[in-house]
Image (cartoon, helix red, strand yellow):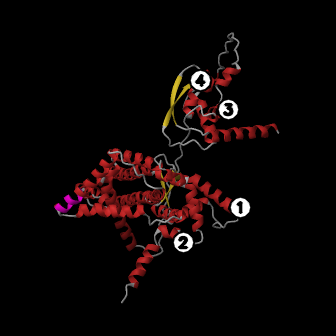
Amino acid sequence: MSNVVAEHGRACDVLARAALRMLDGKWAAFRIAVFRSSFSRERRSVAADLLHQQVDTYMAELVRDGKDVPPSTNGRGLCNQWVDDEWLFRDSTEDGTVFYSLTSGALEALDWVQEMARDRVLVSESRLQTILNEVRRWALEASPDASSRIERLNAEIREREAERDRLAAGGEVATASVDKMLGAYTNLLDLISQLPSDFKRVEEAMLDLHRKFLTDFRNDDRPGLGQMLDDFLARYDRLVMDTPEGRAFDSAFVLLSDEVLLSELQDNLRVILEHPAAEVLDNTDVREIRGAEPALRQGTADVLAQLRRVNETFGEQIVNRNVLEERELDRVLRGIERELADWMEHTGPRTTVPLGLLPPTLKVGHLRERTWDLSTVAPPPPLSREPQEPVTPPTAEELRAMGGPALDDLRAAVVDAFLLGDMDTVGELFNTLPDELRRPVEILGLLHVVSRTGAFDPFAEAEVFEAIRPNGERRNFLVPAATLTPDQAAALDDDTRTLEGTDDE
């Protein structure tokens, strides 16, 4: 006989997972569009009321564009349905704010859609080289033969020494080609895109263990508190190791907590993005690569927060558990059960017992809380009239010093400086402006002007802006460095003239 029955059962189990269910059905595209518009790498959770309003807005926009949306429902109803379908996770903060976040199944489905939308060949030199390096590394780790391990290490040492000597002798540094780097970017994006769903699966596994742990603790009716605590403390020690996700996270936690390694990762990612091949990447891919290190930190923090939640719950259960009161309640319930059995022996099947659901209302007369006090109705003393000195109104210059940025003056300064190539960076330009244009608020105005050219990069290295307040106090601010080409300055000048001509009309 073939194994078609077993394969059919395995396929049914896979198709029943939340990720594939999300991609199935008439409204799959609608769900994907809403989730991708509402959540991102930087926006991992959304307040419940805000998400309800956003879903209503998205539905209205799609209807205006002629697209079909789920009928007879609204944002709140859809979010509740998605929680039941295990695509959204609903939780609350300590202050009672309810929020939604995507489950691991929803993240996996969005990753699949993103990979299919990239339309790139994944079988590349970078992907194959990654496989070969991993196989070589683990073959070295798995081999029990010391001589074989020594031979492999010596070969690697000789290869690296030869490359070092060649470079030291003035050899040419051969950088990767554009095609190779594009393959490396694809491989790297594929690995980075799996991080959020991987961490979310670990977090959900910890949450399931937390719920099971709490249920078992409440249902434990052993009279001996010491024996019960010993049992649950042993289970708590094995909490992380009871699931495959927990074991995987435990093995990787040493690397995730290494600050030096994470800083090195961030530096290496910056070097990779400085290659000329990165110019063909879109902004989404660049943000994905730059966000690898923050994603590792945030995922680790979320899992540790879930573990702390289990720890706090365990402590509260121990503190609040009162075995004596539970025994007393048990005796009361057993006494009620005996009385009920005795009553059933002496009554018929249709006998009723009058039972008051609420206690009677107490009638309490009003008691005077305070005696009459004549001072409470006396008028206040008359106001004294003091001679007032005339107030000098502020001058126009003083009002101007307290106002917003001078956008026109800043735009003109940027155009004049970078059109002629007199300045290297925007920070250098700011530090040479007159004192009235170097207020802290002028920094925001200058960044607003520069952002219209697309030259501002929030992830660039910072430079010092020396601001001067109206009272003469000096303050330094760190702002991402930015520079403009003469073409960008000319484009900014053209936009300014166009706006002025529109105003004149």
Q: Nearer the viewer, mark 4 or mark 2?
A: 2
Residue bearing mark 3: 412
Determine the secondary structure under disc 2.
loop
Q: Earlier in the sequence, mark 3 or mark 4?
A: 4
Label 3, label 4: how far apart the Cα atoms are: 72 Å
Q: Nearer the viewer, mark 1 or mark 4?
A: 1
Q: Nearer the viewer, mark 3 or mark 4?
A: 3
Q: Earlier in the sequence, mark 2 or mark 3?
A: 2
Magenta segment:
147-153
Q: Is residue 321 visible?
A: no
Residue bearing mark 1: 64
Q: Residue furthest right?
A: 505
Alpha-carbon neighbours of circle 4 within 10 Å: few (<14), some, or many (≥20)? few
Q: Quadrant of the C terminus?
A: top right
Label 1, label 2: how far apart the Cα atoms are: 25 Å
Residue bearing mark 4: 373
Name the foreground residue: 242 vs 129. 129
Residue 249 vs residue 38: left or right?
A: left
Is 149 included in the stretch rendered in magenta? Answer: yes
Determine the secondary structure under disc 4.
loop
| Residue 488 picture location, percent across and down | 63, 41
Q: Residue at x 71, y 21 (%)?
A: 396
Q: Residue at x 51, y 70 (%)?
A: 21
